[in-house]
């Protein structure tokens, strides 16, 4: 029979053997929470030494370092210790000092008691996670850089697109020859396709960054389907396809959810179905029975997919086959965006497809019925196209955009003045009286935000109680950027590229507000 001493020695050896090959170290604190023990592998697995810890509390180790104190939720740790509760995966920063690098520690611990049941301290494990934390910081920085790149790319592409789409729209009203009119329409459709690609990239970026938020408001599925039918019927007819929308009962009953994103999901699915179908038909069926999830099916007689291609089609920037990209075009983002949005809604998407025969897609979305009334936006009536007697200041550093704005405003009968940047805009506002200012954001010498602030400051100093409406007209059109314009004091915004109708709508609203 082995003695208790021998068993203790064996247990100690086992403990030391495990410690020596482990990436974590073991520690112990007394009842005053001072470190009394650290395992021998502390120095081998971290940039710490026993001398840095022994006899000290964690607070003394930090030495009042503000950055270290702010880097962790110390209040929560202290609450658990005061309650004699175990804690897990608490991560904190240990300042290096004396030229040593800072160290990030992740630790877990539990209280222990003496033979009399009195609290004796805490025991636990620790690990150096500095490389992991730094890798996370690099990844976050890279993600911020990517988001900034996408925002910049959006701006740089939207700016020339504004000229392309705007001038094409103006040309349409002057072209009588059918063949030339068809050419202008091709230019517009091509520009709109490029704009859709940009929007897909921005949506994917928002989803990956966790910045896409879903609304929860009442909407009607049948109204969404009517809008989609109007858009896709024309595209189907151009390809000689039969396109049918079938509504089950309950589609007119308001549902709670994000109607805009539901419409986007269906739009992407229908766009794909029509794009990849050369002959035959595309059928959209919606079942919205009471107290059941909404079931949406889209069937086509298109090229179909193999099981392997179905798996690939949901991967970012990937299409089912490289030949598909060459033949049909596209970024390969439509289906990944659909899948991620469906997942965000706690829904499900299933694909059944046979090469050469077609594809059957089923989307199930938990959109509960509601008795809430829908706050219907008033139908956007056609804006008046004449603004005679109104004086408008336009500030934009891009010559094409100034030419486009001049052509549109001239066609609407408005008086206007064009300036190149924020400095000239401030001076023009100071020298003349305008009913409205259309202000670009990114301009040399003085940007639109700074020009707005200066104009408002001069208006406030004049103490007249009058303020000219100022609209941000910009290719910086991401949601958080638009929110920044509102906070800065712009009365509204107009995103590039814009149509003549878009401009007429904003003029109508702003100039009517000015009258009131």
Image: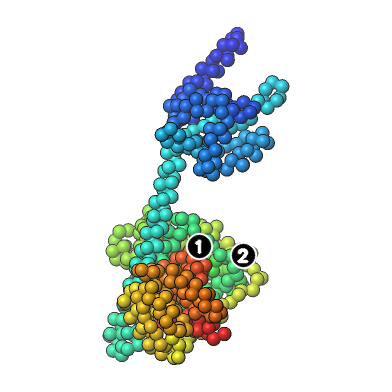
Q: Is residue 285 above or below residue 61?
A: below
Residue 202 visible in the picture: yes
Q: Residue at x 43, y 46 (%)?
A: 137
State if disc 1 and disc 2 touch (CB < 8 Å): no
The front one of 305 and 179 is 179
The front one of 17 and 365 is 17
Residue 206: percent from left, percent from top: 45, 59
The quarter of the rendered structure image containing the C terminus is bottom right
Expressed as whole percent of the image width and height from the top left, the position of residue 249 reads 59, 72
Please indicate, yes or no, whether residue 107 appears anywhere in the rendered image: no
Return the residue at label 2. 368
At numbered mark 2, what does the secondary structure look like: helix, strand or loop? loop
Would you name the residue on which mark 1 appears? 363
What colouring does the structure picture have?
rainbow
Instruction: Report the front residue among 161 and 18.
Output: 161
Depth check: give the residue in front, 74 or 374.
74
Position of 32 relative to 291 (above/below): above
């Amino acid at each position: 029979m082995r003695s208790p001493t021998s068993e203790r020695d064996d247990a100690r050896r086992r403990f030391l053997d495990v410690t020596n090959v482990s990436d974590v170290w073991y520690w112990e604190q007394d009842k005053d929470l001072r470190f009394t023990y650290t395992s021998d592998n502390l120095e081998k697995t971290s940039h710490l030494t026993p001398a840095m810890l022994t006899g000290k509390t964690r607070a003394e180790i930090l030495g009042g370092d503000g950055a270290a104190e702010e880097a962790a939720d110390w209040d929560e740790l202290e609450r658990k210790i005061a309650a004699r509760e175990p804690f897990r995966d608490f991560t904190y920063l240990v300042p290096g000092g004396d030229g040593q690098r800072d160290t990030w520690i992740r630790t877990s611990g539990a209280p222990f008691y003496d033979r009399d049941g009195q609290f004796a301290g805490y025991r636990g494990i620790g690990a150096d996670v500095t490389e992991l934390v730094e890798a996370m910081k690099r990844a976050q920085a890279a993600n911020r850089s990517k988001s900034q790149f996408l925002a910049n790319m959006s701006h740089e592409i939207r700016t020339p697109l504004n000229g392309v789409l705007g001038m094409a729209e103006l040309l349409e009203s002057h072209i009588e020859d059918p063949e030339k009119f068809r050419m202008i329409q091709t230019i517009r459709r091509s520009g709109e396709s490029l704009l859709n690609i940009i929007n897909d990239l921005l949506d994917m970026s928002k989803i990956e960054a966790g910045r896409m938020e879903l609304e929860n408001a009442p909407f009607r599925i049948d109204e969404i389907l009517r809008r989609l039918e109007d858009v896709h019927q024309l595209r189907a007819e151009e390809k000689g396809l039969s396109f049918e929308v079938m509504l089950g009962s309950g589609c007119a009953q308001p549902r709670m959810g994000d109607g805009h994103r539901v419409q986007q999901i269906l739009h992407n699915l229908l766009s794909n179905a029509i794009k990849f179908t050369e002959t035959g038909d595309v059928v959209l069926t919606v079942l919205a029975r009471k107290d059941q999830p909404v079931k949406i099916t889209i069937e086509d007689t298109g090229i179909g997919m193999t099981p392997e291609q179905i798996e690939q089609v949901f991967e970012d920037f990937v299409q089912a086959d490289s030949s598909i990209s060459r033949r049909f075009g596209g970024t390969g983002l439509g289906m990944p965006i659909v899948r991620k949005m469906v997942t965000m809604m706690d829904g499900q998407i299933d694909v059944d497809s046979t090469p050469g025969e077609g594809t059957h897609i089923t989307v199930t979305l938990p959109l509960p019925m509601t008795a809430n009334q829908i706050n219907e936006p008033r139908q956007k009536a056609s804006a008046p196209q004449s603004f005679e007697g109104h004086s408008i200041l336009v500030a934009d550093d891009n010559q094409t955009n100034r030419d486009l704005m001049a052509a549109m405003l001239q066609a609407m009968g408005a008086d206007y003045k064009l300036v190149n940047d924020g400095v000239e805009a401030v001076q023009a506002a100071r020298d003349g009286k305008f009913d409205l200012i259309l202000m670009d954001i990114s301009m040399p010498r003085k940007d639109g935000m700074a020009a707005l602030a200066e104009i408002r400051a001069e208006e406030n100093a004049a103490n007249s109680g009058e303020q000219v409406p100022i609209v941000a007209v910009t290719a910086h059109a991401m949601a958080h950027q638009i929110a920044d314009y509102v906070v800065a004091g712009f009365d509204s915004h107009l995103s590039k590229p814009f149509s003549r109708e878009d401009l007429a709508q904003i003029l109508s609203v702003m100039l009517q507000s000015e009258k009131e």
